Amino acid sequence: MSDETILALGAESKIVRITRLDQPFVLKIRPKKSYLLPEIDNLLRSSRTVRECKTLTIARTLGIPTPTIHSVDLQSYTIMMDYIEGQTLKDVLKKAGKDEIRKLCFRFGQIIALLHKGDVVHGDPTSSNVIVGNDSKLWMIDFGLAEFNATVEMKGVDLHLIRRAFETTHWDNQEIMLSATIEGYRDVLGSKADLVLKRMEEIRERGRYH
């Protein structure tokens, strides 16, 4: 590989930008975890790689912008996909004014609602897992913890995770962000959003007493 740049190093994966035929791509590599039994480690890496590929494709059919997959290697647990030029939503929100924050979070809420409408949950729907393209288009990434056939509980957890991410990462504008995200969510789902939003509140209350 030539022209490699590590973009992110996480507990679960390594993200590397590469260049092939003068075009930029991203490799998502799930490295070996020495503290796990090899059989369990291989099972987890394989299942999450397959799940991510499947969810990226399904999400696109639901109207959600996601990177296109170009190849998958289940021997090295690596996915090669489009490189999206831009910044994470997390970084953009830190610098944006209130009007721009509302606009971006409204769209974020719409994207999550489209996923939930298709009975899919992201599993880790933080502002770090959304790329704001140079044209301000929002792209959803990192579907390794996604689940299908999602219940109201699972969808409520997704929204609870968004709220917690706003509280911990964007505490100074968390109320604006959550309000705009919920508005976007309702914009897609209408009254069907009520049950999930109610469950989000119930999950929050449970956490206060445990």
Image (tube, rainbow, N blue to C red):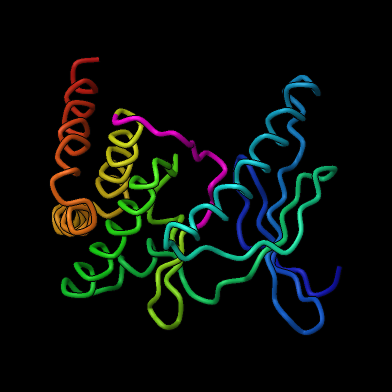
Q: Is residue 28 magenta?
A: no
* In this picture, residue 2 sits left or right of residue 138: right
The picture places residue 5, in percent across and down from the top left corner, at 71, 68
How many labels sit on residues? 0
Q: Residue at x 67, y 43 (%)?
A: 49
Q: Residue at x 77, y 28 (%)?
A: 34
Residue 33's place in the image compared with 134, above or below, is above
- Residue range in magenta is 141-152
The picture places residue 70, in percent across and down from the top left corner, at 72, 64
Q: Could you tell me which quadrant the C terminus lies in?
A: top left
The picture places residue 101, in percent across and down from the top left corner, at 23, 68
Q: Quadrant of residue 98?
A: bottom left
Q: Residue at x 71, y 44 (%)?
A: 30
Of residue 194 and residue 20, the one placed in the foreground of this image is 194
Residue 35's place in the image compared with 5, above or below, is above
Q: Is residue 142 magenta?
A: yes
Report the magenta stretch's main SS: loop
Residue closest to the far top: 210
Q: Residue at x 73, y 81 (%)?
A: 23
The picture places residue 74, in percent across and down from the top left corner, at 80, 44
Residue 40's place in the image compared with 7, above or below, is above
Q: Could you tell me which quadrant the N terminus lies in?
A: bottom right
Residue 50's place in the image compared with 36, above or below, is below
* In this picture, residue 141 sits left or right of residue 209: right
